[in-house]
Image (tube, rainbow, N blue to C red):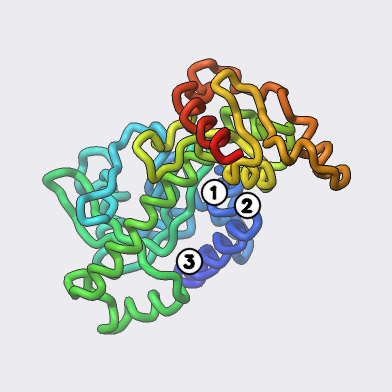
Amino acid sequence: MEEQIRIVAFKWIEEQVQIYGDVLPRTVLEKGFFFNDYRITLVGPQGIWKPRVFQRIPISITTVAGGPYDDFFTNEGFLNYRYRGTDINHRDNVGLREAMQKQIPLIYFHGIVKGKYLAVWPVFVIGDNPETLSFTLAADEHISVAQYLNASHTADIPKVSDESTYHKRSYITSTVKQRLHQKSFRERVLEAYRQQCTFCKLRHAELLDAAHIIPDSEELGAPLVNNGLSLCKIHHAAFDSNIIGVTPDYQIKVREDILLERDGPMLQYGFQQLHDNKIILPRSKALWPDQERLEIRFEKFVKAG
């Protein structure tokens, strides 16, 4: 039955991602789903989580945002995940060790901000490091979970020692790190701006982006909240295209040719009426847009106009 539940759980996670996007609310994961009258929860009080109907091997592992464990990505691109406590024979650690031996796929949830998690699946335990009280985890490509489970009963289990498997999983896990940075930036910026566009106050999160003031490819482009603006998608595009700029004292400027154009209510209310307004700022002054970065960016806006 555990194999069936694991297959259903992976499918359920895919469905939740289609509904909520990559970042899932903890409340949804705690509620879980029903399988033959059993409630299957995906997270719990412990980071290594095993539903009651499972005997030994967990269904998921979680890194909590700001939690007590120092989980990190290794130089090889894999994830270092701390044991539960210091007892190498704690039942949770034994369960992950068995998942490693049988190469059973797990779901990994990484806390982005409080109560929100990036879902990554499938992940495998590929190393056990008692000297550092940690496991090594690797993400793999999305194929049928049943294929992984079927392989675990045969000689077809991928070996991380195989060069091709090692490099593939290293690359895939490295992309998870990039996604974490991107999603974390978005969630922190939107949270700072109270889930609204700083230009027009639109509050539908699915229509909001975290726009970089200085692009992340440049020296000052760090993924910090004060290098970001919460913008609806149309104003994000306008900001990136230098149709709209923001002065270092937080005033919105609309490019002159756009101000003179006459092309219906969207142009009038969506752009022209923003001119000379102040942006909406986070409540915490420490999270306000960095004025030095805004000055650099506004110079580009002026030159583009």
Farthest residue in the bottom direction? 155
Element at badge 1? strand
Q: Say what amino acid the circle numbered 1 marks.
A: Val
Q: Say what amino acid the circle numbered 2 marks.
A: Tyr
Which of the 4 image quadrants contains residue 193?
top right
Q: Say what amino acid the circle numbered 3 marks.
A: Arg
Who comes first in sequence, dot 2 or dot 3?
A: 3
- Is 91 on the left or on the right of 3, as rendered? left
Residue 35: where, in percent of width, then height? 60, 64
- Can residue 196 be seen here? The reply is no
| Labelled pair 2, 1 in contact (Cβ < 8 Å) | yes
Residue 252: where, in percent of width, then height? 66, 27
Kindly identify which residue carries mark 1. Answer: 23
| Labelled pair 2, 3 in contact (Cβ < 8 Å) | no
Which of the 4 image quadrants contains residue 243?
top right
Crowding at label 2, few (<14), some or many (≥20) Cα neighbours within 10 Å?
few
Mark number, residue 20: 2
- Is 193 on the left or on the right of 58, as rendered? right
